[in-house]
């Protein structure tokens, strides 16, 4: 292992045999010298041929620091923590298994932390790559469910209640260790159930240490979104998972915070009806119901239905 390593990229993968190679290839083709970064792929019990693809890729690219591990405890939080434990660099970058990093991705991250030494964490832009095309019912208010993230047109510090998405986030390894990584009570997807909010919980704990979290729109990845898979069942699983995650977080803080969160969700549901009416009046009726359904499903998750 080279002492020159500056950044470790952790990719957790689960049944993404169709896309994991493109994700790994985008990192292999980085402009940053290969001796300066490592890529740690953690397979979280995939049942397809993800393992074969990963191992064949690593074997055929011996000039790069690519490593493969298994994590048998189901859930992204377990897999990310496992990958981070193997990391040998001062910076930890988390990327999804169906993401594609731009060629300057890692170099821009290294340069950012050199320019902003006070940065405790960093998030970047996530651009959906719809296959074959963006559905007509997609809107700004629903696109976050498919990983779209575009927080600011310029470099900025996240406001107190905002934070990076887990699929494009960077943190110092020392800080990751100091907050003991991701909360495994918020594991992400486990079977057909999703308990989300692990990124929110993670960055709120990091902010509690006084760390400054930045956003840089030039730190970009594309995120593959298969339109055919955006079924009502899929959207329910993601939206209700947000609610389930908030239920876990709020009940840990106390009943008062839980009931306060219910009131907030009911208010947002009411606002979604108003937004739906607005879309309909503007001639975009196909966008109306998904916005409302998002809030209904999130509330169901919060109430544990």
Image (spheres, rainbow, N blue to C red):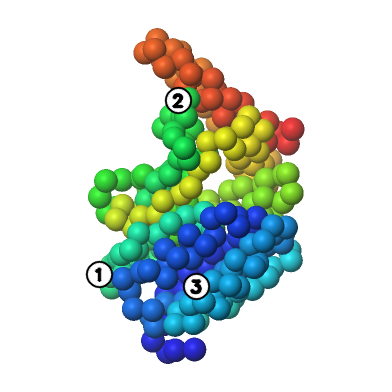
Q: Nearer the viewer, mark 1 or mark 3?
A: 3
Q: Left or right? Give the position of 31 relative to 264.
A: left
Helix, strand or loop status at disc 2: loop
The answer to whether residue 288 is seen in the rendering is yes
- The percent position of residue 115, horizontal first and vertical second, equals 25, 69
Q: Left or right? Give the position of 58 relative to 189.
A: left
Q: Nearer the viewer, mark 1 or mark 2?
A: 2
Mark 1 and mark 2: Cα distance apart in space? 41 Å
Report the residue marked by disc 3. Answer: 39
Residue contact between numbered discs 3 and 2, judged by CB atoms under 8 Å:
no
Q: Nearer the viewer, residue 105 or 250?
A: 105
Report the residue marked by disc 2. Answer: 136
Residue contact between numbered discs 1 and 2, judged by CB atoms under 8 Å:
no
- The percent position of residue 70, horizontal first and vertical second, equals 68, 70
93 versus 301 height, above or below: below
Question: What residue appears at the point 72 percent right and 44 percent down from the top-left corner?
Answer: 193
In the rendered structure, which disc, 1 or 2, sits on the residue that comes first in sequence? 1
Q: Which mark is residue 115?
A: 1
């Amino acid at each position: 292992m080279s002492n020159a390593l500056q950044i470790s990229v952790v990719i957790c993968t689960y049944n993404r045999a169709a896309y994991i190679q493109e994700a790994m290839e985008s990192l292999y083709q980085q402009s940053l010298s290969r001796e300066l970064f490592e890529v740690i792929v953690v397979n979280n019990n995939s049942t397809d041929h993800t393992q074969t693809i990963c191992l064949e890729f690593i074997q055929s690219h011996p000039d790069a620091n690519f490593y493969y591990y298994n994590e048998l405890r189901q859930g992204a939080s377990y897999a990310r923590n496992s990958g981070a434990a193997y990391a040998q660099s001062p910076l930890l970058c988390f990327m999804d298994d169906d993401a594609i990093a731009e060629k300057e991705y890692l170099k821009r991250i290294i340069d950012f932390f050199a320019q902003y030494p006070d940065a405790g964490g960093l998030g970047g832009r996530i651009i959906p790559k719809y296959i074959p095309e963006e559905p007509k019912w997609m809107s700004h208010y629903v696109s976050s469910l498919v990983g779209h993230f575009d927080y600011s047109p310029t470099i900025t510090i996240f406001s107190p209640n905002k934070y990076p998405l887990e699929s494009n986030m960077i943190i110092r390894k020392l800080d990751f260790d100091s907050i003991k990584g991701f909360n495994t009570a918020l594991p992400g997807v486990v079977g057909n159930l999703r308990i989300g909010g692990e990124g929110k919980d993670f960055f709120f704990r990091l902010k509690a240490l006084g760390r400054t979290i930045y956003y840089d729109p030039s730190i970009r990845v594309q995120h593959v979104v298969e339109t055919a898979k955006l079924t009502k069942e899929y959207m329910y699983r993601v939206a209700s998972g947000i609610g389930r995650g908030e239920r876990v977080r709020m009940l840990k803080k106390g009943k008062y915070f839980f009931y306060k969160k219910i009131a907030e969700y009911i208010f947002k549901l009411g606002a979604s009806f108003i937004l739906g009416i607005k879309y309909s009046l503007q001639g975009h009726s196909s966008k109306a119901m998904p916005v409302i359904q998002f809030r209904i499903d999130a509330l169901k998750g919060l109430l544990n239905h």
